[in-house]
Image (tube, grey):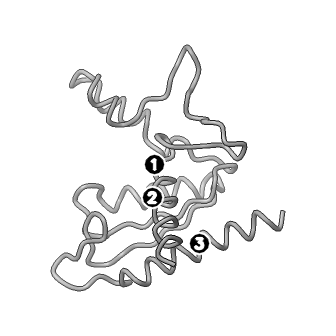
Amino acid sequence: MKLLVTTAAFVIAVSTQAAEFHVAKDGNNTNAGSVAKRLLTIQRAANLAQPADKLRLYREVSPVNYLRKESPPLLMIQGDKDSTIPVHHAYSMQEKAKACAAPVELLIVEKAGHNWREVDAPIEPSHEEIIQRSVDFLVGELNRERAL
């Protein structure tokens, strides 16, 4: 069970960084871009950019720009007190997903900072409930895919 929980959390965490890590169903890396325009990771863009270019590059590599109806299902789990990635980013991603009919679900963790750390009080839902929701999401998507 621990391995499944760890795997589910990793898979879901990786899928939230779709602009950085995305592998097609056939196992090929679909992130390579083309010879003319390779996709940049957010970190690489930040390292290469001049200060005036950083905002443009961050926007270019933002996962919200890659949402499509055909996007793989995504479960976003976001702390409402996250100061690293403010919660409004999750709501923006959810709005964009709805607009293009991308399969995105959002779980807001109350009283949680980045990585669901407690901020002044116990988080809600609990870590155990978050893990269970992650596993349920992953199993549900695997079963849905199997049924197709």
Lower sequence index among marks 1 and 3: 1
Image coords of residue 136 (percent x, y): 59, 77
Residue identifier under label 2: 13
Residue that appears at 56% across and 60% down:
74
Lower sequence index among marks 2 and 3: 2
- Give the distance between the C-alpha atoms of the residues marked 2 and 3, in whole angstroms: 13 Å
Image coords of residue 138 (percent x, y): 60, 69
Q: Quadrant of residue 124?
A: bottom left
The secondary structure type at the circle numbered 3 is helix
Total marks in image: 3
The answer to whether 147 is drawn above or below residue 44 in the figure is below
Residue that appears at 46% across and 60% down:
10
In the shown orientation, is residue 117 left or right of residue 65? left
Residue identifier under label 1: 17
- Give the distance between the C-alpha atoms of the residues marked 1 and 3, in whole angstroms: 17 Å
The secondary structure type at the circle numbered 2 is helix
Residue that appears at 55% across and 42% down:
66
Q: Quadrant of residue 112?
A: bottom left
Residue that appears at 49% across and 28% down:
39
Q: Quadrant of residue 59?
A: top left
Question: Where is the C terminus found, in terms of image quarters?
Answer: bottom right
The secondary structure type at the circle numbered 1 is loop
Image coords of residue 30 (percent x, y): 61, 35
Q: Residues within 10 Å of mark 1 (few under 14, many from 20)?
A: some
Q: Are marks 1 and 2 in contact (CB under 8 Å)?
A: yes
Residue identifier under label 3: 137
